[in-house]
């Protein structure tokens, strides 16, 4: 583990407990090399700050052994806000990632930030008040579709929510208190939810967000990779030959989204006379047996799979996780993806490859926002600052 100049800090020990790698002082000593006295002092500081609790002392009845440690869920709470094209999901979570309350705001596609954010803030305030067991708000995790500026907390390139680019969102959320706001794009946030939901056991994965648009979260060695400018995983705007000349919402032509993104599929199905306005309508039609809808989703999977095959050859993930509204038709989309991946990716790269639905289904984006906030506020360095 990474060490400070004076050895592992209290924040580093807290991270070991939080990640489930240690549950006792003895294990902390074994993992860090610290003396019993040093471990006791650091754990004592964490307990005094309310971040750790002694666990159950009922070893003889199957509980945790005496002296075990666990994260104190009531030491604070985080607010999660997953903002999409036509819906905002809200949730309040404790410090262990357990959901305390949740809500959703449906809105007109195209609503601008000045119209929508005051509604979101009002609903968030009511939601936090409805969760009396929640501790003090210590962070807010926020997701938007498209590229984001993590420092200024705003969208910088999102065809899905036009009009939001360059609008700083932290001032709206400041009405809820002075807790820090952490922002991520929706595909990266989906990847964070997988790390939380699968107990951090998923070390290398590609997490596909297939909805109105297409995005890819990349997990490498247990970390979400964002790239130099946060543009890693922009799979939807990869140029593909079969889309040559087709105009994309981003202003370019030939993007994968023009033949495989939800917005393009909805437009194609609507042109055939089927009444659909959103990807969820398309999926519902497929569920009712609409042959055209089913064919479009399977075809989308094949087109996405061809591009994913290149990423699989480069990164050798253990799993492809499929999320977003299109994942509600997981069998259709996954079948198309598998077909192309096995046809175009190297045999060794696909030998143990798994294709999985998201750990939290439709709530994955919301859980990912909570995980993003928790990772920010409970990072070892942040915990050390909190301890002073």
Image (cartoon, helix red, strand yellow):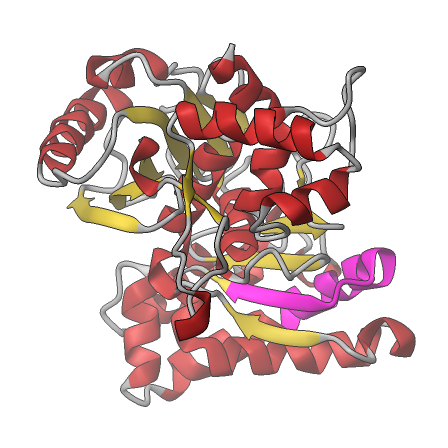
The image shows residue 374, relative to residue 60, as above or below, that is above
Q: Is residue 197 left or right of residue 306?
A: left
List x then y, in percent, for residue 295. Answer: 48, 82
The image quarter in which residue 49 lies: top left
List x then y, in percent, for residue 207. Answer: 60, 57
List x then y, in percent, for residue 372. Answer: 48, 37
Q: Residue at x 69, y 54 (%)?
A: 244
Q: Residue at x 64, y 52 (%)?
A: 21
| Residue 184 in view here | yes
Most common SS among magenta residues: helix
Picture mark count: 0
Q: Residue at x 40, y 46 (%)?
A: 96
The image shows residue 84, relative to residue 306, as above or below, that is above
In terms of depth relative to the viewer, which is nearer, 353 or 6?
Answer: 6
The image quarter in which residue 71 lies: top left
Q: Is residue 228 left or right of residue 106?
A: right
Q: Residue 313 magenta-drawn?
A: yes
Q: Residue 57 magenta-drawn?
A: no
List x then y, in percent, for residue 297. Answer: 48, 75
Check the picture and name the quadrant holding the N terminus: top right
In terms of depth relative to the viewer, which is nearer, 378 or 251?
Answer: 378
Residue range (magenta): 302-322
């Amino acid at each position: 583990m990474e060490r400070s100049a004076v050895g592992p800090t209290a924040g580093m020990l807290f991270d070991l407990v939080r990640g489930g790698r240690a549950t006792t002082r003895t294990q902390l000593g074994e993992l860090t090399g610290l003396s019993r006295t040093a471990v006791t002092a650091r754990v004592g500081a964490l307990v005094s700050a309310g971040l750790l609790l002694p666990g159950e002392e009922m070893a003889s009845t199957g509980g945790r052994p005496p002296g075990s440690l666990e994260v104190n869920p009531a030491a604070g709470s985080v607010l999660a806000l997953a903002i999409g094209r036509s819906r905002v999901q809200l949730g309040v979570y404790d410090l262990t990632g357990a959901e305390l309350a949740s809500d959703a705001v449906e809105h007109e596609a195209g609503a601008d930030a000045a119209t929508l954010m005051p509604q979101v803030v009002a609903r968030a305030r009511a939601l936090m008040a409805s969760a009396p067991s929640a501790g003090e708000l210590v962070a807010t995790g926020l997701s938007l579709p498209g590229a984001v500026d993590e420092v200024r907390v705003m969208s910088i390139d999102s065809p899905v929510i036009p009009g939001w680019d360059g609008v700083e969102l932290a001032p709206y959320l400041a009405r809820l208190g002075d807790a820090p706001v952490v922002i991520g794009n929706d595909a990266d946030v989906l990847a964070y939810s997988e790390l939380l939901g699968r107990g951090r056991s998923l070390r290398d994965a590609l997490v596909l967000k297939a909805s109105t648009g297409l995005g890819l979260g990349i997990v490498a060695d247990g970390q979400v990779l964002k790239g130099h400018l946060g543009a890693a995983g922009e799979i939807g705007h990869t140029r593909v030959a079969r889309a040559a000349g087709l105009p994309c919402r981003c202003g370019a032509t030939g993007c994968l989204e023009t033949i495989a993104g939800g917005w393009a599929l909805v437009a194609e199905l609507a042109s055939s006379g089927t009444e659909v306005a959103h990807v969820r309508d398309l999926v519902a039609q497929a569920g009712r047996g609409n042959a055209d809808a089913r064919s479009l989703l399977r075809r989308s999977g094949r087109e996405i799979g061809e591009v994913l095959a290149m990423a699989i050859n480069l990164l050798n993930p253990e799993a492809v996780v499929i999320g977003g509204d299109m994942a509600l038709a997981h069998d259709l989309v996954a079948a198309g993806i598998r077909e192309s991946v096995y046809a175009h990716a190297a045999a060794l790269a696909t030998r143990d490859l798994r294709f999985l639905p998201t750990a939290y289904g439709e709530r994955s984006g919301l859980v990912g926002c909570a995980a993003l906030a928790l990772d920010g506020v409970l990072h070892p360095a942040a915990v050390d600052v909190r301890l002073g």
